[in-house]
Image (cartoon, rainbow, N blue to C red):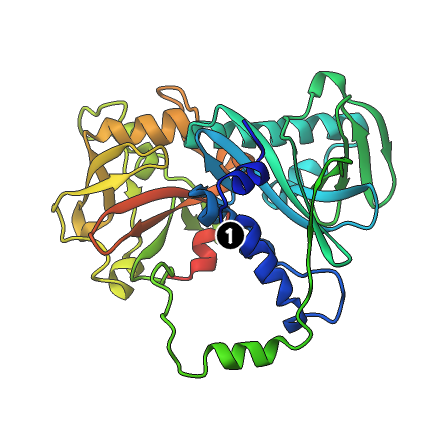
Amino acid sequence: MKSFTEIDITNNGDYLKLLAAVSKLSGLFSESTVPFINYRVAENIFCRSFKAQNLSRSDTAYDAAFNHIGIGLKTFISKGPTSTEKIAEFNSLSQDLSTYKGKSLALKLGEYRNERIALANRIYDIKASLYHIVARRDHELLLFETDYQPIDITNIHSVKENKASLQFEDGHHFYSFNYSKSTLYRKFIIPENAFHLPIDIIEDPYNLLLDLFSNNEFKSATNTLVKGKNYIILPLYGIKNKEKFVFEKSGLNVWNAGGRERNIGEIYIPIPIDIHKNYPDFFPNRDVQFNLQIPTGEVFEAKVCQENSKALMTNPNKALSDWLLRKVLQLKEGELATIEKFDKLGFDSVMITKDKLGVFKIDIMKTNAYQDFGA
């Protein structure tokens, strides 16, 4: 396919116009002649302009998806022909990674990185992938696209290490891993044919804003996420002795419980009592069915059920287990979900959103998302 920059130019779209407009307002944040664009703003502009699915909230390997293409979106200051940028964080695995050194560590990083790419591919039905880059230089933006490859574990070489980091190559790219930040970086090469977008930064953007809003005639955002109103976060685990664990005989592993004969696909997502106490109107009443859409667009029949409305289930219940246990976690029938599995994949919660029409959607959320949500 054409690059997204070429698509925008051909279709006389909004992408380049919005990037330029935001860059012109850089004087609000900096006196530098290098345009300033917050990475979240760049992601939102891209998704709005190309009607791409915004994946940034789930914090998976990709920031967006477009026609089954997974897209990593990056914006950074570029002072030369290359720039080394963050591509993955492994905070939840830092203790495990600290037990490896040298090439063994490089191999383990490749394994974890590739598993997270594969996870995103499964969740969002991704068939191909790429990076879309917005590099910022003096009075201009450089736009280009490059490959989004898994690490070639079979070809890892040139491994070097020091007190602060590990560096290695895989025949395609140069990588480095910062020990203290548990962060993996990749070197990006800026091509000679990158698209150049000149930026004339407005000298006094404050007067522009005063003129724009002088009559107070502006609309508030209609798609803002409001905690407890149109979204909540649910944990896929419990807490015992201040440690996370996945219930062995309830929740995702209720199929493993005794007391009666159970289907191997019987699971539910736990709903903490604080969710109902603090946001009593978010879910429909107990046993009232509603539609729940997964990231691929497939829609399940769902309901809140059990004592104290503690469970989110689907009908048939196997639909939820086929998606979450088999496709996302890739657990075999009879294999328990564990907190170690979640840590390895970098998520342990789900986000439930709903729109004004009462349509509910579910997506995975990064490790500690429920704790950050603070029900």
Is 306 in front, or is 345?
345
Quadrant of image for the C terminus:
bottom left
Give the quarter of the image for residue 333: top left
Query: Where residue 79 appears, x then y in whole percent?
Result: 82, 50
Q: Amino acid at mark 1?
A: Ile
Mark 1: secondary structure:
helix
The residue pinned by badge 1 equals 45
The percent position of residue 63, horizontal first and vertical second, equals 53, 42
Which residue appears at 16% of the width and 53% of the height? 284
Q: Is residue 23 left or right of residue 335?
A: right
Observer-nearest of 109 and 256: 109
Q: Position of residue 207 (x, y in %)?
A: 58, 81
In this rendering, position of residue 110 left or right of residue 50? right
- The residue sitting at 11% across, 47% down in the picture is 288
Quick one: 144 or 305, which is closer to the camera? 144
Residue pictured at 25% horizontal, 64% vertical? 277
